[in-house]
Amino acid sequence: MFTGIVTAVGRIAGSEPCGGDRRLTIECDALSWDGFVAGESIAVNGVCLTATGFHGQCFEADVSNETLAVTTLGRLPPGSAVNLEPALALGARLGGHLVSGHVDGIGTVRECRHDARARRLAIEVPPSLGRYIAGKGSVCVDGVSLTVNEVSGDVFGVAIIPHTLDATIIGGYRTGTAVNIEVDVMARHLERLLEHGSGEGMSRDFLKAHGYGN
């Protein structure tokens, strides 16, 4: 599990075909990999990857065809900046929201504008994901935990504070940028409960009234 609080920005030092899928080499001078071993989970732009080895300031990770199909990782050339977050340690402070690192799909930045010192983004998601995003709820964009300001159809808005612009790759977003999206896992569980009639006392109207729907 992760928190959606990015620890550092790294870069893709290598991206090579490997046995039919792909192997990434990620470099980050801002993090010490002392004590990390093969098998560690590290979120790269919100995608949970298993590190297969560490050397110097780099680690390697294999990326399956399924992950390449549903995330942006296969589109990123060497040199691309990426958000990094090692897995959450038991007992550590939870600063964002619980994030699994299992990306649900790819969104697209449709608008990017300044708002005083912050920046406002409008991000469009596939219709299959729009239903899970609610105003004042949480969403994970390229591994960054964000609060949804408003929702209109399949487009949601977020405000990015200066610290987040400086500490993540979001400061480099432009109109048309493709981003990894992970919806709040609670929304998926609630939908499943409603589908099977297991949510005693719950209804769609009840959930909407309490901020879990549009």
Image (cartoon, grey):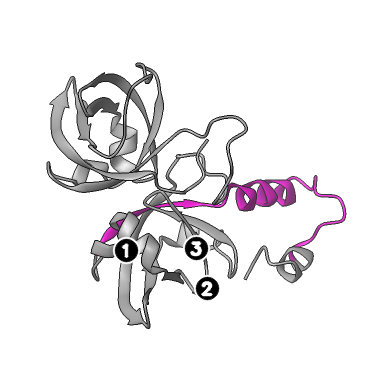
Find disc 2 in the rendering and name its residue: 149
- Give the mark nearer the N terminus: 2 vs 3: 3
> Could you tell whether 87 is left or right of 77 in the image?
right
Q: Amino acid at mark 3?
A: Gly
Q: Is 3 a magenta residue? A: no
Q: Which mark is residue 130?
A: 3
In front: 107, or 174?
174
Find numbered disc 1 in the image and state the secondary structure of the residue it sits on: strand
Residue at 33% x, 55% y: name it. 167
Q: Is 200 a magenta residue? A: yes
Find numbered disc 3 in the image and state the secondary structure of the residue it sits on: helix
Cα–Cα gap, marks 3 and 1: 13 Å
- Tell me residue 45's x, y (percent): 34, 46
Q: Give the quadrant of residue 176.
A: bottom left
In the depicted structure, whether residue 140 falls above or below residue 90: below
Asked if disc 1 and disc 2 are in contact, CB closer than 8 Å, the reply is no
Cα–Cα gap, marks 2 and 3: 14 Å
Q: Amino acid at mark 2?
A: Asn
Mark 1 surroundings within 10 Å by alpha-carbon count, few (fewer than 14), some (14 through 19), many (20 or more): some
Q: Give the quadrant of residue 136.
A: bottom right
Q: Which mark is residue 108?
A: 1
